[in-house]
Image (spheres, helix red, strand yellow):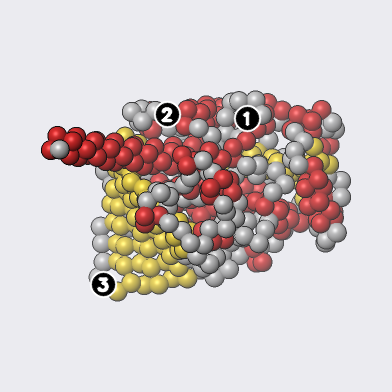
Amino acid sequence: MANRRPSERRLSSDRRGSGMSSRRPSIDPWRLIPMDKASHISGSDDFNVLFVGAGNIMFGSDEGPWNHSFRFEHKLGRRLKVVALIDPAIERATAVLQKKCDSFVVSAYQDTRVFKTLEDFVKNMSPKDRPRAVIVGSPPMFRGTLIPGRDIEMQILKFFPGVAMFIEKPIATGPHHEMEDGFTIAKAIYDSKTICSVGYMLRYLKAVQMMKHIIEENNLTVMATIARYACAYEAIAKPDWWDKSKSAGPVIEQGTHFCDLSRYFGGEVDISTVNAHSLEWDENAGQLSKMTVDETKITPENRIPRVTSATWKYESGAVGSFTHVVALQGTNYSCELEVYADGYSLKLVNPYVQPTLYMRKPGDDHEQMLTFPDDDPFFSEVSNLIDIIEDIEEDPEAAQILSTYDDAVRTYELTWAIREATERSRAAKLKASNEAGKAQREAAAGGA
């Protein structure tokens, strides 16, 4: 995989998100409006939606701003009809539906049925239940492959040809040898011309689109991207997150957003150039004092690194770097992305809470600060998807899918390359240490 260049399997694309081109799609930042200023999409017919997954990403939690159902409710208003909720945890699914039915959005959920599998729904579906969009928010370890039971994308293509898909990120968290399945799924989506959006919502930030606008307007070539993601580990109480065999590690599961943004600005990565180092759980500097998870219940080889630092070359010749840190306590994360081009520095700070853009340009050594209050990239992501499904084309440039499935697989490929690079460097260090220890012991024995 590493010695096959990404350009050899690049798919072309249009605004509908069925594939990908070398030019990253973008949206005029001034078209991205806050959710409370957006009106419900016009029309009187029902808009059927199928939800796959009854967890936090779909219905919200106290841990963050994610809540896809809330955005669909606001975008579609009374037109929204959730025909079914697919989740093997029937009791949980039933409970979240009851909360919805006890609220002002009851009309969207009063006829929603719960099924354990997509196939169960298909067997019991009437023609009027056919969805116009399938929203997949199930855990990534259960999707993104061709293996039965973990092949939800291929099932959707089979049972609902032509129906749009939204897939949460990352596209999978399975073992590396399943990577090729992702590219096979991407090609199937492309060949079928299916509308498909993947949930890299930071691409839809107004600040990010402003950065793209500045780069394109000034015909700039990106020279370097520098990304940093420091999470507040004290608030991460889910044991699976701390277990590489479950979550694939923090870069693949969490840092993926900033690896994706790096690619969004830097272009395709030469995977063979990825180098990385890590600070591991068993090193002195890797000891954490505020963990809420009992790490002793996780086998040593599956415990996550505390720091991952990676560098790479883009196909353009530009350089990229990414550092993920498990160090902060409390609840707030610290995240930044810097993009450099001739004469320009663009720095995105705090994108999850209060996105701020610091810009330096030719003729002025001082940074200009831009803020974007009330921006909601989750809503912009959903809004653009619905507009494309509805085929609203008063202005074709108004709605764009910014992350296709093929593009998302490439981000997944980069994050896996980073993890493998850290494991190689750790193995090399341990080998060198063992050999040095052996040499010292032999020398001591010889001297005796």
Q: Earlier in the sequence, mark 1 or mark 2?
A: 2
Please report the residue visible at 50 percent of the width from the left and 65 percent of the height from the top.
329
Q: Earlier in the sequence, mark 3 or mark 1?
A: 1
Please report the residue visible at 38 percent of the width from the left and 68 percent of the height from the top.
358
Based on the displayed image, in which of its 4 quarters is residue 422 positioned? top left
Please state if 64 lies on the left or on the right of 11 as rendered.
right
Place of residue 40 in the rendered image (x, y in percent of width and height, measured from the top left): 72, 58
Q: Nearer the viewer, mark 3 or mark 1?
A: 1
Q: According to the image, label 1 marks what residue? A: 151
Distance from disc 1 to disc 2, alpha carbons, whole Å, reads: 21 Å
**Direction front: furthest residue:** 448
Is 233 placed above or below 187 here?
below
Dots 3, 1 in contact, CB < 8 A: no
Residue 414 shows in this picture: no
Distance from disc 2 to disc 3, alpha carbons, whole Å, reads: 42 Å
> Label 2 amino acid?
Arg
Please state if 197 lies on the left or on the right of 42 as rendered.
left
Q: According to the image, label 3 marks what residue? A: 365
Label 2, secondary structure: give it: helix
Label 3, secondary structure: give it: strand
Q: Looking at the picture, tell me which residue is in the foreground, 93 or 211.
A: 93
Q: Looking at the picture, tell me which residue is in the foreground, 20 or 270.
A: 270
Please state if 133 lies on the left or on the right of 197 as rendered.
right
Q: According to the image, label 2 marks what residue? A: 9
> Label 3 amino acid?
Asp
